[in-house]
Amino acid sequence: MPEKYDFSKIEDRKKFEKLPKEEQDIVIGEAQEEAENLAKRVESGEAEKMVGNKEERKIVLTSEQEKAKQKIIDYLTWGNINHALEIKEEFSLQKEITQQAAEQGFIKYLLYGGNVDTALEIKRRFSLSEEFIVSPEVQRVARERFIKFLSIGDIDFGFKTRDIDSAFEIKDKFSLSEEFIQRAAGEEFIKCLSGNVDTALEIKKRFFLSEEFVQQAAKEAFIDDLSGGGGDIDFLFETKNKFSLPREFIASTEVQRAAKQGFTACLSIGSINSALEIKKRFSLSEEFVQQAAKPGYINCLSSGYINPAFIIRKEFSLPDEFIISLDVQRAAKQGFINCLSIGNIDSALEVRKEFNLSITSQEIFNQVPELQSLLFQIQKISLELFNQAQKSIEVVISLVAFKDKFKSDKFIREIQKNPFLFSAISENPRFSSKLLIKYSELDDLSQENIKFLFETKKEILKTNPELSPESLEFR
């Protein structure tokens, strides 16, 4: 597979130019498909429209001339000006045809993120007119490149980096309107406020954003991040300090409302430290905190965030009458099922024990479709185990470990090979449920020993039906 070349980089262009002609054609050919996908709006029959679509430009070309024109476009698309000029000379194409090809190659090169200097070199070497540079299509592509450079810039070692200098070059060389520049810079400034204050400040400085706009945007970003509950509180106050947001703004009704929303949102997702930080920084009242802690606790519990829920209960001293309320019981049941659905058996058992839950197997099967599917497979090979699963929560919990497709198939094969497990489940659901989970993980000798014990027990009871398995004599 040919090496990938970034023709916006001088070193890649030099490497490419040293390749034999045949290899250069291969590289261009490989890149062509990608080029077509990236420039659908430039292609798809609209190429003439991009460069004016003037009737007088429609000149009939021979097949060879058409290929030569396309080669000029391809070479310029990747910034290879010298090879494009060689093709021009070799085929003695009419100036108008060369101009059309150069205009299309220029637009594509700019569209794909080529550097501004090379784009302007194409303009100079092919004598592209100022009228073309200020045409709607070139201006549209220049605006796109400006926004890209300002927002994500070039890809550098796999990371997206801004390139404000290149954005400025685009702005100056293509005479983009001040109205567009201010709007695009303002939008990017707002985005940076939620994660990169230093870049926001640089955009403010370089593009002379008005203080009125900056203050208003910073205030709105502060409130949005605070009310969402997902932001870093230290970062919020960094925004406050770097944009000199006034003290009266922080104490305003609007910010207090956002702090309360953020506190509740943090508790709802189990982000307790952030909630406590909001409480401290914004001096939330104890009365509000106590009320807000209750829905946060219920949401964590029902979502299966068991440890955060227990921390909320302890941290905010939730009263016993609330803990035994019907709402909390419902949340606990839902949390139990959600824990099982993601395979978190330990947390599910903890919830069941803590709230002394009363729940049926069918309630679990109804909300965990993978278990329902496994149950149907079990029904085909063991009606005994199927019936036991319908009655015993312990059996259901043991089956959770095998609810995924790969594990369920392996489990079915395992119990088909070891039918003694069926009767073991029936006789002692609690113990045998644990055996079901661990049996396939045991080594061969341990499996043989367990199988021997169960078969021996079965034989003893068969010859001594009057003997109870629980009796001293049997033991």
Image (spheres, grey):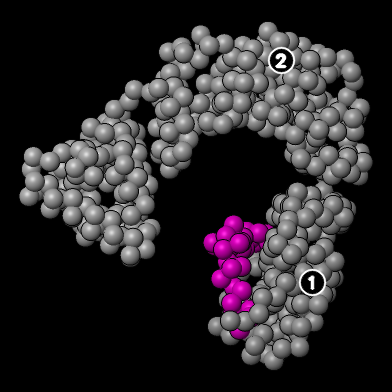
In the rendering, at what x and y percent does residue 226 appear?
73, 26
Looking at the rendered structure, the secondary structure element under dot 1 is loop
Residue 90 in which image quadrant: bottom right
- Provide the residue designation for mark 2: 257
The structure residue drawn at horizontal position 66% and vertical position 80%, both measured from the top left corner, is: 3
> Can you say whether 442 is above or below 340 in the image?
below
Residue 309 visible, this orientation: yes
Left or right for 74, reference 236: left
Left or right for 399, reference 473: right
The structure residue drawn at horizontal position 33% and vertical position 54%, both measured from the top left corner, is: 439
Q: Quadrant of the C terminus?
A: top left
Q: Mostly what secondary structure, the magenta segment?
A: helix
Residue nearest the observer in this picture, 274 or 25:
274
In space, the residues marked 2 and 1 are separated at their CA atoms by 51 Å
- Provide the residue designation for mark 1: 9
Region in magenta: 26-55
Magenta span includes 54: yes
Looking at the rendered structure, the secondary structure element under dot 2 is helix
Query: Type of residue at label 2?
Result: Arg
Magenta span includes 60: no
Query: Type of residue at label 1?
Result: Lys
Q: Tally the marks.
A: 2
Residue 428 in which image quadrant: top left
In the rendering, at what x and y percent does residue 192 appear?
78, 40
The structure residue drawn at horizontal position 27% and vertical position 39%, both measured from the top left corner, is: 429
